[in-house]
Structures are given as C-alpha cells and as structure tokens.
Amino acid sequence: MLEIKNLHARIAEDGTEIIRGLNLTIQDGEVAAIMGPNGSGKSTLSYILAGREDYEVTEGEVLYNGENILELDAAERAAKGLFLAFQYPVEIPGVATMQFLKVAINEQRKARGEEELSTPDFIRKVREASAELKIDYDMLKRPLNVGFSGGEKKRAEILQMALLEPKLCVMDETDSGLDIDALKIVADGVNALRAPDRSVMVITHYQRLLDYIVPDTVHVLYKGQIIRTGGKELAHELEANGYADIIGEAA
Ligand SMILES: Nc1ncnc2c1ncn2[C@@H]1O[C@H](COP(=O)(O)OP(=O)(O)OP(=O)(O)O)[C@@H](O)[C@H]1O
C-alpha cells in the first residue's frame, strides 16, 4: 500500500513549492488514475516518488508498505519494486536497449538477493514480452530510445515495466504520442500486469486511456493537492465538463 501524507515539496533550485499538502492512498491491486490541469504537479509527484533529486520534500511522508521511501535513493526504491514510466523517456546513446534491460533486471535481482538471470533466460523473457507488446526485436539492438518514435519510446517503457515486474507502477502520460493501435497494445500490456499485489498510478489527461485501463479510483490533482477523489465515472465527468466546477467547489 502506498500512503502519501500531507506531502509538501519544492523545486530545489529556486524553492518554488509545487506539491502543497497532498494526501493520497493507493491500495495493493488498485489502479488509480491521476488527472488534473496542466502544471498542477502530476509529473512532479511522479518524480518525487521515483527519487529525483531536483525536488526537496519539506513536509509529510510517503510510506510504501509502511516504510518511508523518501529516505531511500532512487535505486533502492526501484529494488523495492517502484517503477516510473516517464512522460518523456530519456535517450541513452551508446547503450543498446538489450544491454540496458539486462543490467536493469539483474541489478534489481541482486539488490533483492536473487540470482542473476542467465543470458538464454533473459533473451527468452525479452522475446516473449516484446512479442506481446508488438515491439520489433531488432529495435532492441539499437541504443535505448535513440531515434525511437514517440510511440516506440512509450512501448519500450512498458517493455521495461513488464520485464522488471514492479510492485508499484507510476505511469506518466503513457498514452501521449500513441496511435490508436499502440494505445490498445500498451493498455493490454498494463492490464496483463494487474495483480492483487501490484498497484498502478496512471497519470493521464484523457478519459480515452481509461476506457482501456479501467481505474478503480480517479483523483484530481490541482495546485499540488488532491481536490477530488471518485470512481471511474469521475473521469467521464471531467471529460464532459472540464475542471472548472470541481476547482470552484474546492476553492
Ligand atoms: N525543475 C523545475 N523548474 C522549474 N519549474 C518546475 C520544475 N519542475 C516543475 N516545475 C513547475 O511546476 C509546475 C508543475 O509541473 P508538473 O510538470 O508537475 O505539472 P503537470 O501537472 O505534470 O503538468 P502537465 O499536465 O502540463 O504535464 C509547473 O508550473 C512547472 O513549470
């Protein structure tokens, strides 16, 4: 279970507060959608969860299964099962995607005290997962994300997620840049990962993605706070009416 309690965070460089008293609980097995206007702090929240150093938490706590993960570095959080699928996946020139995946998987296994995957086992896993996500296996010989189209980058993120089998998946606008077919493939990939012991936080602007990845809960983030929580029907309400009413009520 993820529990975010009264979280306040600011940009380290200039001290601007972006997250302003955010409370959010996500149960094991739950898929929670986070929606909200541009600039409300959705990506910032995901970066703070992942442990990016550009942000400073000034108050509050983030408990994952009771443990305050703010005290862990990014690699330790990943080893605990946290995974962030970026809004803008980074390009890593000179590192073949396959190599990256192998190191990522084995580092996490090591951190958990498990044995490394053998090369044949690793290749079999990647072949299976990439076939399901309709990713051309040859593409994985190319440097990570370099020259990948927007949609290919997003699919490569989901491939990483499928291979790492995280327990808490944070997906930041994974639907942006995907064509209709890719959206379904990616959604199927995420749905295949749904499990009683795995939670997913889906950040999105559009109801469309939530038709495929049907959330258990929908939360509206505005000016660094959750101002409304509801079921999947809340996303339909937002799509139809926009944010004005909810923001007005919260004010
Ligand atoms: N490192 C930074 N330096 C300066 N401003 C930042 C930084 N990080 C975030 N911000 C600002 O914080 C606010 C929240 O940004 P964030 O990207 O979290 O919003 P968002 O809800 O994800 O927006 P969008 O829907 O447009 O992706 C924005 O006004 C943004 O400009």
Image (spheres, grey):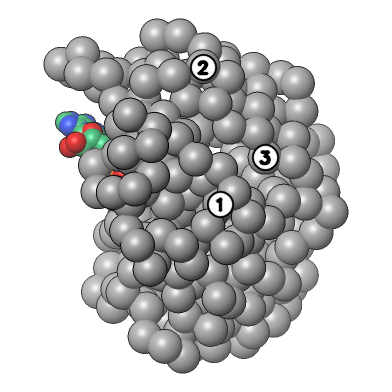
Instruction: Name the kind of residue labelled 1 in the image.
Output: Val
Tell me the residue at 38%/68% (across/down): 240
Residue highlighted by disc 3: 26
| Rendered-image quarter of ligand 1 | top left
Q: Is residue 30 above or below residue 54?
A: below
Where is residue 76 drawn, in percent x and y?
61, 29
The answer to whether the beta carbon of the residue marked 2 is less than 8 Å from any atom of ligand 1 is: no
Residues at marks 1 and 3, CA–CA distance in whole angstroms: 11 Å
- Residue count near mark 2 (Cα–Cα under 10 Å), binned few <14, some 14–19, many ≥20: some
Which quadrant of the view contains residue 81? top right
Residue highlighted by disc 2: 6
Left or right of 184, for residue 164: right
- Rendered-image quadrant of the N terminus: top right
Count all numbered tags in the image, as a single digit: 3
Tell me the residue at 48%/49% (across/down): 34
Instruction: Name the kind of residue labelled 3 in the image.
Output: Ile
- Residue count near mark 1 (Cα–Cα under 10 Å), binned few <14, some 14–19, many ≥20: many
The image's mark for residue 218 is 1
Q: Earlier in the sequence, mark 2 or mark 1?
A: 2
Q: Is residue 244 above or below residue 248?
A: below
The image's mark for residue 160 is none
Residues at marks 2 and 3, CA–CA distance in whole angstroms: 15 Å
